[in-house]
Image: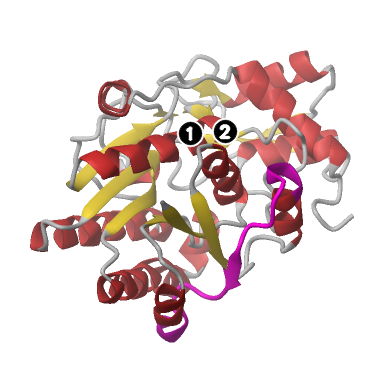
Amino acid sequence: MKVLVTGGAGYIGSHTVLTLKSAGYDVLIYDNFSNSSQAVLERLEELSGEAIPFVEGDIRDQERLDDLFQQHSIDSVIHFAGLKAVGESVLKPIEYYDNNVSGTVTLLKAMKKAGVKNIVFSSSATVYGSNNQVPFTEGMPTSATNPYGYSKVMIEQILSDVAKSDPEWTITLLRYFNPIGAHKSGRIGELPNGVPNNLMPYITQVAVGKLDHLRVFGNDYDTVDGTGVRDYIHVLDLARGHVKALQKNAAVKGVKTYNLGTGEGVSVLQLVQAFEKYNDIKIPYEIVERRDGDIATCYASCEKAQRELGFTTEESLKDMVVDSWRWQKQNPKGYEQ
């Protein structure tokens, strides 16, 4: 089976590409490198032992995508490509809706034209909004607190409508919780542009001396220590979840939705303490005001993914913090050494 991976040079995409290769899939990467590095392709070749075909292009380029599907015999798509910073989405909503929503519609047009009706979509726990009670289950109503989250809600609706309109479509929506960690080799990992929006790369950049200290947004939530609680999942476990989703798509048509998390909540300070303990390094931090749109607690119910996909996580919290630090320590300047 040949799988097109949009955004395949990105953080989650690159780890998934390697996992797909290990599982015997042929892979084609499509990426515009707006939030990734071309150097990732060299690292993927090094780790997989072979060059992985790629096409450079934007997800909104209809002609480019139509040509791609004509030139390559593609069986299914894993769709990662999209803008992903919550804070930036509030400042640039038009860009987020254009890239994420319009880009997905453009991709679906190309898929429909080529008769490729099999897709796994990279969604997010942000679609649970701020009104649902934890643990979040797949049947809960969706909403959002920012344009990034709403772009995911909209795309989920579009994909669901497509599946209803044509029974030949096979669609899986994977709602990620908080991916962290890196490949065991330390050769690929998370490389955010500018100041990190996510907690783990912020911690690792403090550890490597790139940033002075960590800012913790709020310590007055109703949680174990007052800081926000999230469900952190190792990116390698997340990648394995995509292989499970492709296998499910091969067996069951229609639209399916699954949470990918551990089902356990970890607070900001608990994550910092685990990083310090297992890597033997101090992380200075200061408490600052809450961020708008943040919720106190977010973690998954993983029962459906376990039952229907056979998905369980293999990596521990220790693995997550050790692998994150190995990546940052070996690549203090990212891919451009």
Tag 1–tag 2 contact (CB < 8 Å): yes
Locate the C terminus by quadrant: bottom right
Q: On the image, numbered disc 1 is attached to which residue?
A: 240
Q: Position of residue 265 (x, y in %)?
A: 46, 20
Q: Amino acid at mark 1?
A: Arg
Q: Position of residue 62 (x, y in %)?
A: 40, 82
Disc 1 crowd rating (10 Å Cα; few below 14, some 14-19, many 20+) is many
Tell me the CA gap for discs 1 and 2.
6 Å
Q: Position of residue 303 (x, y in %)?
A: 29, 21
Q: On the image, numbered disc 2 is attached to which residue?
A: 236
Give the residue drawn at x 9%, y 63%.
165
Q: Position of residue 334 (x, y in %)?
A: 80, 51
Secondary-structure class at tag 1:
helix
Secondary-structure class at tag 2:
helix
Q: Is residue 61 magenta?
A: yes
Quadrant location of residue 38? Answer: bottom right
Disc 2 crowd rating (10 Å Cα; few below 14, some 14-19, many 20+) is many
Residues rendered magenta in the picture: 46-64
Closest to the observer, 219 or 233: 233
